[in-house]
Image: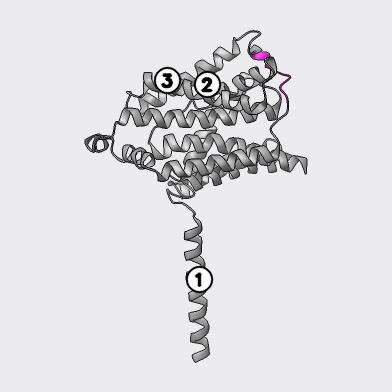
Amino acid sequence: MQYLEGIIILICINLMVVVGLSLLTGFTGLFSFGHAAYMAIGAYTSALITTKLGVPFFVGIIAGAIVAGLAGWLIGTATLKLVGDYFAIASLGFGETIRLLLDNGGKVTGGARGFGGIPYQTTLLIAVTVAFLAVVVMRNIILSRYGRSFMAIREDEIAAQACGIDTFLFKKKSLVISAVYAGIGGSLFAHYMNYLQPIMFDMAKSTEVASAVVFGGLGSLTGSILASIILTGVPELLRPLFQWRLVFYGLVLVGTIVLRPQGIMGGKEISFVGLKKVFRFRLKEENSNNAHSGNK
């Protein structure tokens, strides 16, 4: 039972980071390959102030989110005027820079040895509650005027500018919101693992998060949620297979990209209204078939 709870907590933590990156990549059209850096900033900030200063856990989460958001604002100011692949390369460089800074942080971050003694605070209830609220907030952002502006930039940045959208400002807002989500995920991660090492937030972690967004389907919040569940849950459930679980993980990713390049959801969403329509349609079909059989 504890093992299953642990998997659910990890799913919720990864969900926070993936949903945040989904706004930046899936809805705004900016690919980031250094997103683990914001997660690391949130994790270390929260861990340091809760451990060294003794502040409450929720204050640590807020602090981690704020510092990660500020980092996103600073990086956005410096790099968001770059076009296409150049921003992705810049984000990759930022991710590695943060990892190296943490690696050489000495007594402050613990360096390569890591930072331990972090109090365990991320329970199942807290992880699920924070993840649920995060999804609700993100859904409202996407359905708002801001969400439509983000999607307009994704579709055609020049046309969005012609319509009066300040594309630079909105891209920066998207990056900051995405960084805040990653910072919260990092804070939860720190207080679940009780121990941090810079290698936990290397390029492989950034690639894992980015692949989850693509796997779920660009421009689909539902797809990001499903991808977080599948790509976090499947390797953990296959852990008894040792290294073979990574083979299955790779086969799932490659198979999805080959058979369904648009991702699981392909930019579509699952909603209660949509499910009601499906059930009503199925019910009408059954009633029609029964009536047809009765006439015969």
| Magenta stretch bounds | 112-119
Answer above or below: position of 40 versus 170: above
Answer above or below: position of 167 versus 90: below
Instruction: Please give the label number shown on residue 67.
Output: 2
Type of residue at label 2? Val
**In the image, is residue 114 part of the stretch drawn in magenta?**
yes
Determine the residue located farthest toward the top in the rendered image: 106
Left/right placement of residue 269 relative to residue 51 reads left
Q: Which residue is mark 3?
A: 75
**In the image, is residue 92 part of the stretch drawn in magenta?**
no
Type of residue at label 3? Ile
Measured as percent of width and height from the top left, residue 278 is found at 49, 65
Which type of secondary structure does the marked residue at label 3 adopt?
Answer: helix
Dominant secondary structure, magenta: loop
Q: How many marks?
A: 3
Q: Residues within 10 Å of mark 1 (few under 14, many from 20)?
A: few
Q: Quadrant of residue 49?
A: top right
Left/right placement of residue 124 relative to residue 224 reads right
Which type of secondary structure does the marked residue at label 2 adopt?
Answer: helix
**Disc nearest the viewer among 3 and 2:** 2
**Disc nearest the viewer among 2 and 1:** 2
How far apart, in angstroms, are the residues tagged by discs 3 and 2? Answer: 12 Å
Q: Residue at x 63, y 29 (%)?
A: 58
Which callout, 1 or 3, points at the residue further toward the start of the chain? 3
Q: Residue at x 47, y 19 (%)?
A: 94
Q: Which residue is mark 1?
A: 282
